Image: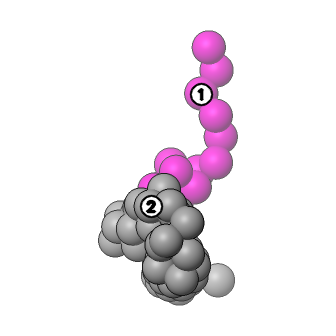
Amino acid sequence: MNDRKLVLFSSILRWVLGVIFLGVGIAYVKDGSWPVMVFGVAFIVSGFFRPRRCLDDGCDLPKP
């Protein structure tokens, strides 16, 4: 899988998970589910950032 497809898959996965969490939060809003909605929004926002760790530099961790 090339880098472009991997980034697109990661973004779509985060958006879908964000919408799921947001939907569950809205469904249970009367029970105080605002943290679930904030978590869903965080997932949606993080879908707009490009993952870089294993794409640009490789997956090797720096040695201390």
Q: Is residue 5 left or right of residue 38?
A: right
The residue carrying pointer 2 sits among few (fewer than 14), some (14 to 19) or many (20 or more) residues within 10 Å by Cα, namely some
The earlier-in-sequence mark between 2 and 1 is: 2
Mark 2 and mark 1 residues within 8 Å of each other at the beta carbon: no
Residue under pointer 2: 34
Magenta span contains residue 52: yes
Quarter occupied by residue 1: bottom right
Give the image location of residue 44, x and y in percent. Answer: 41, 72
In the displayed structure, would residue 13 be above or below residue 53?
Answer: below
Q: Name the amino acid type tagged 2.
A: Trp
Q: Name the amino acid type tagged 1.
A: Pro
Give the image location of residue 59, x and y in percent. Answer: 64, 48
Give the image location of residue 2, x and y in percent. Answer: 57, 81
Q: Which residues are magenta?
A: 50-64
- Color theme of the render: one colour
Q: Which mark is residue 62?
A: 1
For image coordinates 39% across by 68% down, the residue present is 41
For image coordinates 55% across by 75% down, the residue present is 28
Quarter occupied by residue 10: bottom right
Q: Is residue 21 left or right of residue 38?
A: right
The answer for how far apart the CA atoms under marks 2 and 1 are is 38 Å
Q: Nearer the viewer, residue 14 or 56?
A: 14
Helix or strand or loop: what does disc 1 sit on?
A: loop
In the displayed structure, would residue 24 be above or below residue 49?
Answer: below
Q: Is residue 26 left or right of residue 48?
A: right
The residue carrying pointer 1 sits among few (fewer than 14), some (14 to 19) or many (20 or more) residues within 10 Å by Cα, namely few
Magenta span contains residue 11: no
Position of the C terminus by quadrant: top right
Is residue 5 at least partly visible in the picture?
A: yes
Give the image location of residue 61, x and y in percent. Answer: 64, 34
Q: Residue furthest top?
A: 64
